[in-house]
Amino acid sequence: MDHLLTVTFATPDAARATLDRLAGDARAAPLEAVCVVSRNLRGRIDVVGGRPDQDDDSFWRRLVESLPFEDAPREADTDVGLPANFVTSFARALQPGRSAIMALTNGVDLDPLLAAMGRHERLIQCDLGDGGGEALRHRIAPDAGERPIWPQSGFGSFQ
């Protein structure tokens, strides 16, 4: 079962710091399908792929730009096919001055993942169904080409 997860943080840099810390955590498998979304105090949204060795920015950027953030500059206005309650919850949670980690996952045990992340504000999860991650990628960025399938264990197992 594929999921789109967002974990929000109280400060603009907290998501990036958490993702960097997780990348160095020997208990965690590398996070592959992930990005960091930050919103500055003026409402400007910045999206950065979670792994510098993968060109995933176009998918994440297009996905985030299609979400209805109030008072945020928008370059795209598309229907991404996500449930309205997920989209609304994430847009409300990412207020100016906040940040988030967004990730596509498959079969992730959330309790160890959230424990490894440490202090965060909120988890917002969207069930995409089997194969839903690739389907979402194709809807959002069909011209970005095929992406490797992330491991079935999702973020990996935590000891």
Image: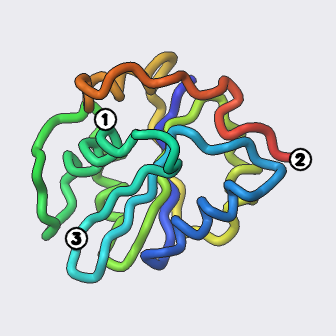
Q: Is residue 102 above or below residue 18?
A: above
Labelled pair 2, 3 in contact (Cβ < 8 Å): no
- Which residue was labeled with disc 2? 159
* Label 3: few (<14), some (14–19) or many (≥20) C-alpha neighbours in 10 Å: some
**Residue at 47% from the left image edge and 78% from the top image edge:** 11
**Residue at 50% from the left image edge and 50% from the top image edge:** 52
Q: Secondary structure at mark 2?
A: loop
- Which residue was labeled with disc 1? 82
- Is label 2 or label 1 in front? 2
- Is label 3 or label 1 in front? 3
- Displayed quadrant of residue 58: top left
Distance from label 3 to label 1 (Cα)? Answer: 22 Å
Q: Position of residue 61 (x, y in %)?
A: 29, 48
Q: Nearer the viewer, residue 41 or 143?
A: 143
Q: How many marks?
A: 3
* Label 2: few (<14), some (14–19) or many (≥20) C-alpha neighbours in 10 Å: few
Q: Secondary structure at mark 3?
A: loop
Relative to 76, 92 lies left or right: right
Placement of the N terminus among the 4 image quadrants: top right
Q: Secondary structure at mark 1?
A: loop
Label for residue 44? 3
User: N-terminal of the two: label 2 or label 3?
Assistant: 3
**Residue at 30% from the left image edge and 22% from the top image edge:** 138
User: N-terminal of the two: label 2 or label 1?
Assistant: 1
Q: Nearer the viewer, residue 142 or 51?
A: 51
Amino acid type shown at disc 1: Leu
* Label 1: few (<14), some (14–19) or many (≥20) C-alpha neighbours in 10 Å: some
Q: Position of residue 145 (x, y in %)?
A: 33, 22
Relative to 150, 8 lies left or right: left
**Residue at 76% from the left image edge and 47% from the top image edge:** 28
Amino acid type shown at disc 2: Gln
